[in-house]
Each structure stands twice: as structure tokens, then as C-alpha cells.
Amino acid sequence: MKIGFSSATCPQWDLKTMVEKAAEFGFDGLELNGVQSEVHLPHVSELADDSGQARNLFEKHNVQLVCLSCSATLDAKAERQLTEARARIVEYIELAGSHHCPFVRILPGRVQRRDHHRIALSRIAEAIRSLVKPATEQKVTLLIENGDDFVTSDSLWFVVDAVNHPAVRCCWNQCTALLEAERPTKSIPRLGQKLGLIHLCDGEYKNDRRLLTYTALGEGRAEIARQIEILKGIAYSGYLMASWPKNQIAALQEPEEALPKAAEYLRQRLNEEQTVLTAYKGDKNAPKYTSRRAPAFLSEV
């Protein structure tokens, strides 16, 4: 597994600073969901520039551009709104393709008024299926992250299984799943090989499943160490992406302090010897009698 971080953790940094700090702190990759005040990535001048300067920047520091995060959702009932959302996602897919970025991430959206959860999921899956062709042409994988009204692993599995194409996979955020009290021992094995990216954040929760505050990785209830242990068990080889919304909550720790700690913590967890997970409880057919001392004449032979 490799480690990276999201630009949501450092909303004041420009692209050059992000890449340089990623290399300095020991991260392998970077996810972009905005650069400073610009949240629509196709409008970021460094990315829109066709001269290859951005690609050279990443290559120079041996940091990979892993994912572009798009805010468009495919939950609308109105065809006009759905067409606009698809066009926006295609714009991201083409941008990702031009930068050899493997993933574009979206959220599923909301259950619309007078709608049903499964009907909404079916409509979202159908809209995603229409994006398979442009994603395949650009060699980009579309990631669906749990969130909004669809936070559990069964919702993500429903969509990805309905689309049934290798160009569509899951981005999993256990911190979000805890809002429905779903633990990693259930979600990660369920999604298995459909996982394309893991978002890691941590926090403290109230009994009513309300997130109280975000914490440093490993200090909250998101079971970060357990997640990594299970991911090792299913042979996950993708990215662990440190992500918390500094871009929305200014009081969170500054990235200069938080990111080095996150990198160190994740490296320690990855370097730990893997625990053997097994249901084996011993040989049920083992002899029940006590072993006896060999006869004296045998020990003299």
C-alpha cells in the first residue's frame, strides 16, 4: 500500500507547495479536490496548462497525482440537470486522462423528494454506466465514495455491482460509515476487490452517531489500525489517503503539523507485522490421553 493526502487538508497551499510538502513528509501521492480558492479543477491554471509543467512537477518530486475530486452528483431526476452533471464529470475525466491521473472521485448524492433509496441508487448506477465509455477511453477509473444519503457499504456495492465494469470502483471512508455505526470488519470485506481508494480520517462520535470532532489519525473511533490490518488481509495494494476537511473547518490542526504526524503513523501501521486472522482453534481430533513415558527397554536401544 501507498500513502497520500487530500488537498482538503491544506486549502491555503498552491499546487507546487502541495507536491513539495508531499515529498518532504514522505507521501507517495496527492488527491486534488481544489487548489486554494478554486474548487473547479479544470479552471486551475497549472492543470489547464498543456505545456506539461504540472506533470513535470509531480515527476520531479516522485509524487503521483492519484485522484481528482469532482463535486457533481448523479442523483437528479430532471434530465437537464443530469446532462449537466455528466458533462462536468466528463470534463474531469478528460483532465485526469491528460495528466495520467488514474482516478476521478464523485459522491452519490441525495435521495430526492418523493423518491426511494433503491430507486435513487438504480438511477445513479444508470447514469454512471453512461460514463464508462469516456472513462475507458481516457484510461481513468471512476470512484464512488460513500457519503450524502448513501454512507454504508451495501449502497456502494449496489451501485458498483449494477454497473459491473472495471472502470467503476469504490472509494471508502470509514469515518463516514460510522454515522450508521458500520465497522470496518463488515464494510471492507464486503467491498473487497471493488475498492479503488481508501480515505482515512478519524474522529469522536456521540451515541446518536453524530460526529463531534475530527482527531489525528489513530486517536478517534474510526479504527484506523484495524482498517489497515483488514486491508492487508484482502491484499489491497492501493492508496491510503489522509483526508480531513480543513477547507471547511478552519479550527482543525494546520497541515504543517498534521500531515507529518499522519505520514509517520501510517508508515508505522504499514510496517507492522500482519496479524494472522483465522478461525482455527486447534486440532479437534488431537489425542485426549496423557502421553506416557517410554518403557525402559526402549530407551536403552
Image (tube, helix red, strand yellow):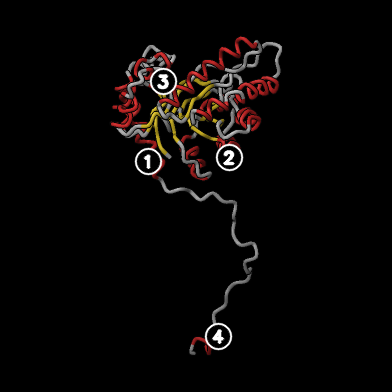
Tag 2 near tag 1, CB within 8 Å: no
Whole-percent x and y of residue 66? 42, 30
Looking at the image, is 213 positioned above or below residue 264? above
Q: Which residue is mark 1?
A: 268
Q: Residues within 10 Å of mark 2 (few under 14, many from 20)?
A: some
> How far apart in space, not on screen, are marks 2 and 1 (Cα)?
23 Å
Q: Which residue carries the number 3 mark?
A: 8
10 Å crowding of disc 1: few (<14), some (14-19), many (20+): few
Circle nearer the N terminus (4, 3): 3
- Determine if residue 86 is in view: yes
- According to the image, label 2 marks what residue? 189
Question: Where residue 254 sits in the image (x, y, percent)?
Answer: 33, 21
- Residue under numbered circle 4: 295
Mark in the foreground, 1 or 3 = 3
**Amino acid bearing label 1:** Gln
Label 1 to label 3: alpha-carbon separation = 23 Å
Q: What amino acid is found at the position of numbered circle 4 in the picture?
A: Pro
Q: Nearer the viewer, residue 84 or 71?
A: 84
In front: 301, or 96? Answer: 96
Q: Please tell me which of labels 2 and 1 falls first in the chain.
A: 2
Element at label 2? helix
Residue drawn at (56%, 12%) of the image? 84
Of the two numbered discs 4 and 2 on the same chain, state the one appearing first in sequence.
2
Q: Amino acid at mark 2?
A: Pro
The answer to whether marks 3 and 2 mark residues whose Cβ atoms lie closer than 8 Å is no
- Is there CB contact under 8 Å for labels 4 and 3? no
Q: Secondary structure at mark 3?
A: helix
Which residue is at a point 37% across and 32% down the rendered structure image?
64
Q: Nearer the viewer, mark 4 or mark 1?
A: 1
